[in-house]
Amino acid sequence: MQPDSEREESTRSSRSNPTRSFVRAFVAASYLLGKRRHALSSHVAATDPVAREALREITEQQSHPARERRARVLAGEVGRLIRSLGAQRIK
């Protein structure tokens, strides 16, 4: 299980870096659509070091053997995605 301090750092980093936020949201959405393990990252060609690290991190978290852990991570990512979409104005 990821310590609270690491989880908080991950959350802060996602909010402050659009690349990291996009990669984490993309993988979370892929997980919701049924992709698992290596398929979560197989269609992402990340060349940016921040994107590669975010991709490795979220893929590892969503491939964790404990279902509760995967659910907790997914809930956090979906929550951030919903809040981000809610902050956008539809024109």
Image: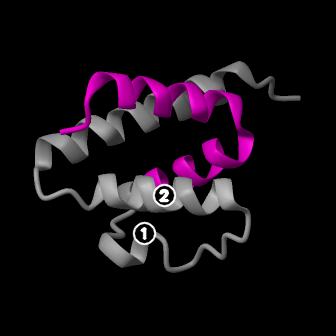
The disc at residue 27 is 2
The mark total stands at: 2
Q: The residue under label 2 is which amino acid type?
A: Val
Determine which residue is flagged by label 1: 40
Q: Secondary structure at mark 2?
A: helix
- Residue at x-position 31% and y-position 52%: 61
Please provide the residue range marked out in magenta.
1-29
Q: Residue 4: x, y in percent?
A: 29, 23
> Of callouts 2 and 1, which one flags the residue occurring earlier in the amino acid sequence?
2
Q: As displayed, is residue 42 above or below residue 53?
A: below
Q: As displayed, is residue 88 above or below residue 71?
A: above
The disc at residue 59 is none
Q: Residue 17: x, y in percent?
A: 70, 37
- Residue at x-position 60% and y-position 54%: 23
Q: Secondary structure at mark 1?
A: helix
Quadrant (top left, top right, bottom left, bottom right) of the N terminus: top left
The colour mode here is one colour
- Closer-to-camera residue (87/12): 12
How packed mark 2 is, by other alpha carbons closer than 10 Å (few <14, some 14-19, many 20 or more), is: many
Q: Which residue occupies the extreme right position in the image?
A: 91
Q: Residue 2: x, y in percent?
A: 25, 37
Is 11 part of what is drawn in magenta? yes
How packed mark 1 is, by other alpha carbons closer than 10 Å (few <14, some 14-19, many 20 or more), is: many
Q: Identify the main secondary structure in magenta.
A: helix
Q: Is residue 66 left or right of residue 11?
A: left
Q: CA distance from mark 2 to mark 1?
A: 6 Å
Q: Is residue 66 left or right of residue 15?
A: left
Quadrant (top left, top right, bottom left, bottom right) of the C terminus: top right
- Residue at x-position 63% and y-position 28%: 15
Q: The residue under label 1 is which amino acid type?
A: Leu
- Disc 2, disc 1: CB below 8 Å? yes
- Closer-to-camera residue (91/48): 48
